Image (cartoon, grey):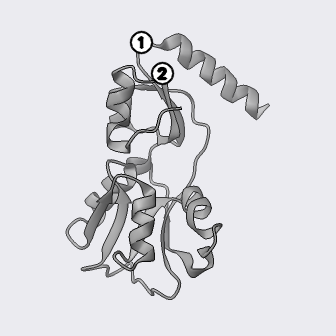
Amino acid sequence: IVAQDWDGIIPSLLARKYDAIIAAMSITEERKKKVDFTGKYALIPNKFIAKKGANLDFANLDGQKIAVQRATTHDKYLTDNYGDKVEIVRYGSFDEAYLDLANGRVAAVLGDASALEEGVLNKAGGDAYEFVGPSLTDAKWFGEGFGIAVRKQDKDLTKKLDAAILSLRD
């Protein structure tokens, strides 16, 4: 297992620092230009999380600071849909974004619902937060679901990983 900042995760795969990316990576058209993917193993909605009672108005987020992990599908979605209305605060890790949410430096964090649930809601103090706003699943930004990314030339590894995913479903 290799820890890697998200914005360097594909370049490091291509540089052979590891053989596959198993990190809730969305299968998107942009990423498919650089790497191959296994079939999807999960499709998780994307959500915003905020402190309870924040009363964020998603019809008018003008001036709000919204946190995302840098170079993710969440970053692209916010940039494309709210970039001219909100201040997007980008972080190298989800933990950094959560710390700024906890300390009141951002109004909300956008991420995978399961990661937000496990990383915030189900932890000590998590009852101070809640999901807010829409549940986001549009394939234009969030892809087909999560898959394991592999270098394009590693076809045998992709086949083995696909077989392993299928065996888990049976």
Quickly name the residue at label 2.
19
Q: 166 left or right of 34?
A: right
- Whether 46 is drawn above or below 139: the answer is below
- Whether 66 is drawn above or below 168: the answer is below
Place of residue 82 in the rendered image (x, y in percent of width and height, measured from the top left) = 28, 67
Instruction: Tell me the distance, in whole angstroms, between the alpha carbons under discs 2 and 1.
Output: 11 Å
* Between 5 and 107, the one nearer to me in the picture: 5
Place of residue 157 in the rendered image (x, y in percent of width and height, measured from the top left) = 55, 15
What residue is shown at x 41% (from left), y 83% (from top)?
56
What residue is shown at x 45% (from left), y 66% (from top)?
98
User: Given the image, on which type of amino acid does mark 2 rest?
Assistant: Asp
SS type, badge 1: loop
Q: Residues within 10 Å of mark 2 (few under 14, many from 20)?
A: some
Q: Residues within 10 Å of mark 1 (few under 14, many from 20)?
A: few
Place of residue 68 in the rendered image (x, y in percent of width and height, measured from the top left) = 37, 60
- Whether 138 is drawn above or below 4: the answer is below
What residue is shown at x 26% (from left), y 72% (from top)?
86
Farthest residue to the left: give it.
84
Looking at the rendered structure, which numbered label has been put on residue 6? none
Place of residue 118 in the rendered image (x, y in percent of width and height, measured from the top left) = 62, 60
What residue is shown at x 45% (from left), y 54% (from top)?
138
Q: Kindly indicate the quadrant of the structure image that contains residue 130.
A: bottom right
User: Given the image, on which type of amino acid does mark 1 rest?
Assistant: Gln
SS type, badge 2: loop
Quickly name the residue at label 1.
153
